[in-house]
Amino acid sequence: MAENSDELILVITTFPEAEKAKEAARHLVEQKLAACCTLLPGTSVYSWQQKLCEDSETIILIKTRRELYASLEKKLKEIHPYEVPEIIALPVVAVSQSYSDWVKEVTAS
C-alpha cells in the first residue's frame, strides 16, 4: 500500500448521455487531469426545482491527484451540460503502490 495514498482522489460525476460522458473522459485524460475514467450506466432519482425526477445517466469515476482537483472541477464545469453538475471528490485511503505511481506518472504536474 502506498504510504502517501492521501494524494489520490476519486472524483464522481454524471452525464445525461453516454457519448458526452465518453468525450469528457477522453478530454480529462488527454489533458492529464485524470489518469483513468471509468464509465458506468446508471439511473439517478433526484429532486430538481421541486419535482421528483428519474433519468438515465452515465457515471464517470475519475482517478486523479488531489492537487489537480481545482483544475479538473473547472474543466468539468466548462464542458458539462448540467446547470448544477455533480462533482464529488472522495479521498483514497488505501491504494497499491504501483497504481499510485502510475496515476502520478500520467497526470500533469
Image (spheres, rainbow, N blue to C red):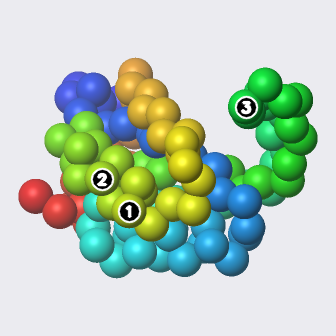
Residue at the spot 28% in from the left edge and 72% down from the top edge: 31
Residue 9 against residue 38 in the figure, above or below = above
Residue visible at 41% across and 57% down in the picture? 76
Query: What is the distance, in whole Å, between disc 2 and disc 1 at their CAs?
Result: 6 Å
Q: Residue at x 23, y 53 (%)?
A: 71
Using the rendered image of the protein, determine whether residue 35 is visible from the camera's viewpoint. Answer: no
Whether residue 40 is situated above or below residue 65 in the rendered picture: below
- What's the mark number on residue 74? 2
* Residue closest to the far front: 49
Provide the secondary structure element on which disc 3 rests.
loop
Tell me, for residue 78, which label it has, or none.
1
Residues tagged 2 and 1 counted as in contact (Cβ below 8 A): yes
Residue sitting nearer the eye, 12 or 108: 12
C-alpha span from label 1 to label 3? 22 Å
Q: Which label's residue is closer to the chain start, 2 or 3?
A: 3
Quadrant location of the C terminus in the rendered image: bottom left
Q: Residues within 10 Å of mark 2 (few under 14, many from 20)?
A: few
Instruction: Please count the marks in the image.
Output: 3
**Residue located at (27% from left, 26% from top):** 6
Q: Provide residue 11's location: percent of width, then percent of height.
A: 46, 41
- Per the rendering, the mark at residue 49 is 3
Q: In the rendered structure, which amino acid carries the disc numbered 3?
A: Gln
Q: Residues within 10 Å of mark 1 (few under 14, many from 20)?
A: few
Query: 109 or 57: nearer the eye?
Result: 57
Q: Which image quarter holds the N terminus? A: top left
Using the rendered image of the protein, determine whether residue 77 is visible from the camera's viewpoint.
Answer: yes
Q: Secondary structure at mark 1?
A: helix
